[in-house]
Image: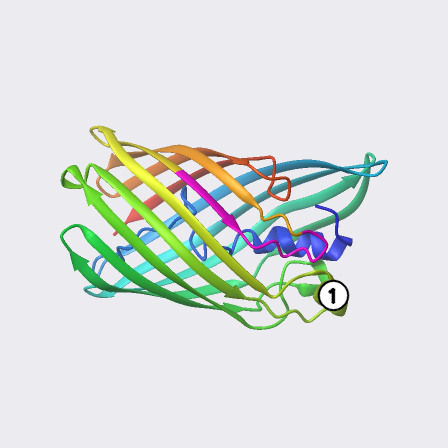
């Protein structure tokens, strides 16, 4: 994960926007928008750790991040999602010495979620979004320019909804203000992921997720790939919590990440 310091911190911030323009336990988003005239508020947190070696240099990256996501149903089959990521601390150490450090809000993401097929347990949804450059680009927390994303989401339910499979195919376009970042970082990000959820007991759901994406580091052709496992638990009808662990399958992905969050439903 060796880039110049500003590009490293930028890519850390971008990791909160890829796929989770979706936030939460799974990177793979389900096809269902929130019900019409209902709102969900998500508070999501993640701690990521990664170590790498380049020549004689040893690098350690650590990041504590979170986001606030507001998901509102407009009419049946159509919702709007606003996601505000926040980096509590992102730091890189080279041979034990600090190389870069950043903290603050990242770019705001506003998405629409339109379900255009809902038949026999199969649901297909389009999810276009815009990336607003609200973060501090000089700290590596923002593209510095507007971007956009679009995703195709599919969900298939089995056993009367007790077992569900999701899949996503997505594209993101990032435009960078900083010349150094623009030279080191790709603009076009393609993502693909598949997830499943199984209700194993009343109010308890097990989930697994796997995916890969284009490597935005121009110096590497290896795609970042991950695997994730976690649980969801419905404390009461209006409150759901989750916890999970994500592991990198390929080297460009973070070695490990711990996820924790809560969803309030209104």
Task: Give the x, y percent position of residue 23.
Answer: 43, 50
Secondary structure under badge 1?
Answer: helix
- Residue 217 placement: quadrant: bottom right
Front residue of 223 and 244: 223
Residue 74, image x, y percentages: 25, 67
State the count of labels: 1
Magenta segment, which residues?
209-220
* Residue drawn at (38%, 54%) of the image: 168
Residue 212 colored magenta? yes
Q: Please give left or right for residue 110 compared with residue 2 in the image.
A: left
Task: Tell me if residue 161 comes above or below residue 138 in the rendering.
Answer: above
Q: Which of the image's four quarters has the N terminus?
A: top right
Q: Is residue 239 above or below residue 171?
A: above
Q: Is residue 34 magenta?
A: no
Q: In the picture shown, does residue 198 fall above or below 115?
A: above
Q: Residues within 10 Å of mark 1 (few under 14, many from 20)?
A: few
User: What residue is pinned by disc 1?
Assistant: 183
Of 14 and 124, the residue lying toward us: 124
Q: Residue at x 42, y 48 (%)?
A: 193
Which residue does the image show at 41% across and 41% down from the upper left? Answer: 25
In the drawing, does residue 54 fall left or right of residue 133? right
């Amino acid at each position: 994960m060796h880039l110049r310091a500003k590009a490293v911190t930028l890519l850390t911030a971008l990791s909160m926007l890829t796929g989770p323009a979706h936030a939460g336990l799974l990177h793979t988003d389900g096809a269902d928008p929130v019900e019409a005239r209902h709102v969900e508020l998500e508070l999501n947190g993640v701690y990521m750790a990664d170590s790498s070696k380049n020549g004689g240099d040893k690098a350690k990256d650590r990041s504590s991040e979170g986001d606030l996501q507001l998901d509102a149903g407009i009419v049946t089959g159509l919702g709007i999602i606003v996601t505000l990521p926040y980096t509590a601390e992102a730091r890189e150490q080279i041979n034990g010495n600090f190389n870069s450090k950043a903290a603050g809000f990242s770019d705001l993401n506003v998405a629409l979620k339109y379900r255009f097929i809902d038949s026999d347990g199969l649901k297909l949804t389009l999810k276009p979004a815009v990336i607003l450059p609200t973060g501090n680009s000089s700290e590596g927390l923002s593209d510095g320019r507007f971007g956009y994303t679009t995703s195709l989401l599919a969900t298939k339910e089995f056993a009367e909804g007790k077992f569900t499979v999701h899949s996503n195919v997505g594209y993101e376009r990032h435009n960078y203000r900083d010349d150094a970042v623009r030279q080191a970082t790709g603009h076009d990000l393609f993502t693909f992921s598949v997830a499943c959820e199984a209700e194993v007991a009343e109010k308890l759901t097990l989930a697994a997720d796997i995916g890969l994406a284009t490597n935005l580091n121009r110096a590497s052709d290896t795609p970042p790939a991950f695997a994730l496992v976690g649980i969801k638990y419905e404390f009461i009808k209006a409150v759901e919590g989750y916890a999970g662990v994500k592991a990198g399958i390929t080297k460009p992905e973070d070695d490990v990440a711990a996820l924790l969050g809560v969803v309030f439903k209104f």
